[in-house]
Image (cartoon, rainbow, N blue to C red):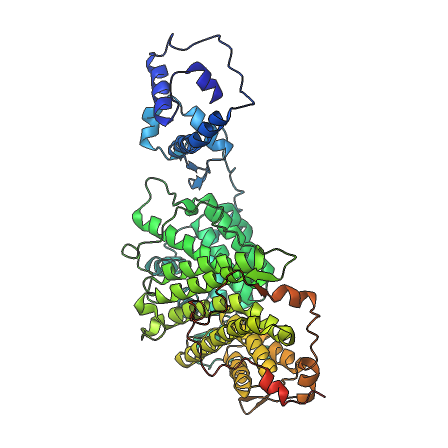
Amino acid sequence: MRILEHFFPDRELNLVSLRQIAQDVVDGRLVGSVTEGEPMAPISEETTPDEGEDAFQDEKPVLDSVNDLHEPLGTMMRDSTGRYRYVGAHSDIAFNAAVCSMGKEAEMRKNPNIIGPPKIGLYPPPLPTMSSTDSGSPGRSFFLPRRELCDYYISRFLEDVHSTHWFYSIEQFLYRVETTYTGKSGKLSNSWMCSLYAILGLGAANYEEPSGQSPLPADSPAASDEKSSEDYIALAKELIPAVYDEADIDSIRALAIMSIALENLCSRTTSYLYMGASIQISYSLGLHRDSINGSGASMELEQNRRIWWTLFTLDLEIASRGGSPTMIDDRYLRITTPLPSEQVLYPGLHTPLSWLSTSVSLCRLKREIIQAVYTERFMNSRAISFTTISKLLLSLQGWQQLMPPHLKHDVPAPPTHKRAVAVLHLQYWSTTILLCRPFLLYLVLRHSTLEPSKKVWFERMGKATIDAAQKSLGILQQMAADNTISSLTAFDSTCLLRLVMVFILAFAHTKQPQYRGHIETSISLMKSLEQIGFSKMVAEETPMRLADLGIPIETKEGNTSVLLDDDLIAQLWGNLDPNFMTPLQTQQSLDLAFDDSNYSDLNSEIMQLTNLDDSIVIDASQVYSSFDFR
């Protein structure tokens, strides 16, 4: 730009003027109009205050001009496979294309958003071709189970997984399955088959028992399957290198579905890696910028939008289980992709209208909570400002109040929508627990040293945590009654485990029998789930952890009961040192720094933020006073 400013000192250089200059060069009108041979003026290292202020005021228009220069000259580039890849404005490729396109205005008008391919070479280079012995005939080169088995597994996937994690237009998906079995689809892509194997692995998840006996009745199609869930996942894993090479929309689907499946099989790290790869491919295709080549149909565009926002929510879900950073951070990443239009693309039988947009708005709130409470607070401080927590709690309450009426929990929903609606509310209450549980833990560990003026707030936060857990338990009980609770993903079991941890704190702190009953109910729900993968691990390990805390679980004739070890409970909970916490307890508990003078006003808006159950007991003094800890 400095060079151009030297040759055109009297012209404002922006997109329009640069195009005109380029056209003048082509038409021969620029001859003799350029000042030649004059030295360039040096860049001044000092500016007067007035000049500095003027420069600051001009900064935004200059940046706007730079953006105008880059964006129309190319954001997508066609690779050697025929797929369009997104190229950001900070790339050398984009800048080089902007320079090389000067003087080609007529050509650029045809496809102003497309960067031309290299003139020499293929990027990426051709992939190695399979030998004739490996290629097989179309539709025959991959193992396929009997069609009735495939249909059964797909139906489970659509009901339990796809209802909340959308990847396919159902009509197109079922058509592809049909042509895959009939051989009419031609050569099957590795990414498509990887997706299908992952779906089969999810659907077949509970049909392999240690004894070799299937828990299904003999007339069930899945009882006779020669392959287990692990077999289908192994077939999908074999295709992963080829999925990376294809790097298309099907690759995004395959890796994301594999991420869900592997997380449920307790392969959390691999699940996280596959989720990251899926998002990186979506970046390369420009899904975050709503980029698509000019010939793209509106249906394809809406499909890509829905896939992108599914990745946005799933990214947080997968990363949160291990406390890992998300691949998508919309604080720094410019996302211009709008939410999909449900008038153009129907979400399907199992997903209510407006479900995705409502889930995305909650996901944004959860990301904000994680950043404020867990990531960005000072590492040497266990306190967080009262104002920050108040704003976050009020934002959550506002989200619940603004929820579309047909998605509210107390509004009857069609049977096919019940799981999606229930999951949405479980996500809400789980987010509330995420925000409030550090204060419940702090209250339990430090209750004897808390000042009375502070204790009222910690008890309020503790009650909000317990209230959210109780409401979550009610939702999960209803899901069990509706037969919509599932073991095909780790979500349901994770929710149950989260509730047990809250009820352990509530029970050990107050010794109220109602919390013991909640623990019993939660364990019963865990054991009622199909015992596979993560749900099986949770159902087996949680009773062991409870026994270590003096709350052993006993199951007789299908009934679960909690047996109390008063001596152990007294030993564990009666002699807590309020001045000592383990490093992990320090990390997971929070103090409040009251930066608002109205924090003690019991009539304040924040004090009325939740409609808490009056039966919730959190004050431990009455119980401890009559309990012998000796």
Q: Quadrant of residue 109?
A: top left
Closer to the camera in the image, 509 or 544: 509
Does residue 583 appear to the left or right of 523 in the view shown? right
Q: Quadrant of residue 19?
A: top left
Q: Work out whether 190 lies above or below 550.
A: above
Q: Work out whether 433 lies above or below 564.
A: above
The furthest residue to the left: 343
**Is residue 163 visible to us here?**
no
> Which residue: 48% across, 78% down?
470
Give the image location of residue 593, x and y in percent: 57, 62
Q: How many numbered markers are drawn?
A: 0
Give the image location of residue 461, x and y in percent: 52, 71
> Which residue: 69% across, 80% down?
572
Give the image location of residue 401, x and y in percent: 36, 67
The furthest residue to the bottom: 557
Closer to the camera in the image, 273 or 359: 359
Instruction: For the C terminus, give its image quadrant.
Output: bottom right
Give the image location of residue 412, x and y in percent: 31, 75
**Is residue 474 visible to us here?**
yes
> Which residue: 51% across, 15% down?
41
